[in-house]
Image (cartoon, rainbow, N blue to C red):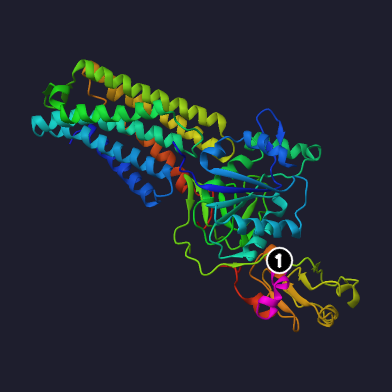
Amino acid sequence: MNTQNIWLLIAAAVNLLMCLIILSRGVKNSKINLYFSLVAFFTFLWTCVLIIPNLGVSYELIRFSEALSCPTGLLIIVCLYMFILNFPYKSFDISKRTKIFLASSVLWTIVFYLFFYQFSVPNIEIAPDHVIASFEWYSYTLFTLNFLILVFMSIVLLVKKYRTTDGIYKSQLKFILAAVIIGALVSSYANLLLVYAYDVRYTHLGPLSTLLINFVVFYFIFSPKEKTNA
Amino acid sequence: MPKNNKKIYLLLAGGTVLIDKQGHFYSVQKKEDIALWLAQMPELNILADMETVLLAGEDDVLQFSHWENMARIIKVKAGQADGFVIVAPVEQLAQTGAILGFLLQNFSKTIILTGASISGTDYNQKKALIKELRDKHSGSGLKSNLINAIQVASQTLPGPAIMFGTRLIPAVKAIPANSNDRANMFVSQDNNYWGRVDFGISIKSGLQTSKPRENIYDKISAKILTLQDVRGVDWNLDKNDLLKYEAIIVKLAGNYQLEKEKQLLLEKSGRSVILYHRELSVGSGSLVCLADCTWETAVAKTLWAVANRKKLPAFEKVMKQNIAGEFNNT
């Protein structure tokens, strides 16, 4: 198994573990737990989808999984946006326009990349140590723009929350902001923009960078400073 | 599109000091101050459908009438509310919570108490403290306390609770923390918490939420004498001094037997007497001894038991019973 797969497996395992940990805390009364567990779950799914091409199974399966990386990636950022909206509490209502934008982003990506994957990924090149997918240029560019707009919206929302919060939540938001910015920058570069250059050497960096926010959340939950029997 | 928000009643009884980034102070002294005060926290209206009731101004010291009024309003509004949040002065938060714990037993709606880290509008006397709060906590802490309280108020809890800093504490177990941490000014006497703020608000699992029948009381006695005993120091009281009270509660300085002369004085007074120390294990004649609970709860329980004597079993029996989960490790 090559090094890239090992890193991807680690990232998948950590995200799955975090998803289960957060789910066990209950999602019924906590939108924070709900959306973060979805972020972790879709990151796990995205990482699995990135592993499949490296396993060298059937041509069609590889093409399908390459296409699936787009909607799963978009679902991560949409759930992240919803998580940021609700963390640590919902301090803004999003406009109808934003809700439509989020819903339509998810809808078109899922429909297009799932049901028209043969059009969206017309060709893949299988080499001994890597697989390079050719994405249909116009649709992929639209996806890239869509994704980057959502990343920008998430960071702006996070900054806005950081500036208006006080007390104990302010320091938590500082860590989340740092983790999201680093994760977004690394994933966008390694997994989104390098596709244009047909460079797949750093595909594992995106999932690995998501571990940062997982570690931050893990720290919040399990940090020993508050010894309470709760 | 109609909001599907929970309806929360916000009862203001002091503890409302807000400090914004520019160093302006906001508090609620009278009804007209409420709108401007709420405007500093627009998030509250997104979290819940709020209705505000003013019970006491920022500079008022809560009295028995305030607590009775609080219980009465909560009882009247219970049908319309999903939960109640009470803002009270930090110095009286534990006492208020303990009293409500006895007046509103097994209450069907959640009651959360919270407040700012400072109370009263004598800001000139508290300059150093205010500077510390602004530097370390970006304010009086009220906004985050209130936001957490509102989020918890719509969830089912076994009884009234105090939401302060990162801790959700059963109201009958809350005591002031012996630390300089102005964010977390209360602890639970037996280290039993109902929740904490870590990644969002995490409520302890397994809390008893199905409740037996409600027992609502609307009276607490005002005629209680509280004495702080120090061994070897005379009280300088005689029997006639005690006659104007219905009950006497004596806080002992340790786990010891009360001096014979003091015991005799109390026994001859003909009043209901409680001796209290957190770890009291030695008896003093025929006097009722109370331990394993907080001082605020001991006082609240005495006030409630004396005022409702006619509806309750014998005083001594009631004081020993675990009424509102007040005894340690219950």
Q: How many marks?
A: 1
Rendered view: A17 above or below A39: below
Residue at image position (29%, 20%) is: A144
* Magenta span of residues: B303-315
Residue A30 spot, x, y in % from top left = 43, 46
For residue A205, say whether it is visible: no
Which residue type carries mark 1?
A: Lys
Residue A73's spot in the image, x, y percent?
29, 30
Above or below residue B74? Residue B8 is above
- Side of A153 where B218 appears, left or right: right
Question: Front-most of A72 and B191?
Answer: A72
Image-quadrant location for residue B283: bottom right
In this rendering, position of residue B175 left or right of residue A195? right
Residue count near mark 1 (Cα–Cα under 10 Å), binned few <14, some 14–19, many ≥20: many
Q: Nearer the viewer, residue B33 or B168?
A: B33
Q: Nearer the viewer, residue A217 or B289?
A: B289
Q: Which corner quadrant holds the N terminus of chain A?
A: top left
Image quadrant in which you'd find residue B128:
top right
Q: Is residue B178 left or right of residue A78?
A: right
In reply to whether residue B291 is colored magenta, the answer given is no
Residue A127 drawn at (x, y percent): 11, 24
The question of residue B308 being in magenta is answered with: yes
Q: Secondary structure at mark 1?
A: loop
The majority secondary structure of the magenta stretch comes to helix
Q: Which residue is mark 1?
A: B219
Query: Is the residue B295 above or below the residue B266 in the image?
Result: above
Chain on which label 1 sits: B
- Residue B92 visible in the snapshot: yes
Q: Position of residue B59 (x, y in %)?
A: 78, 46
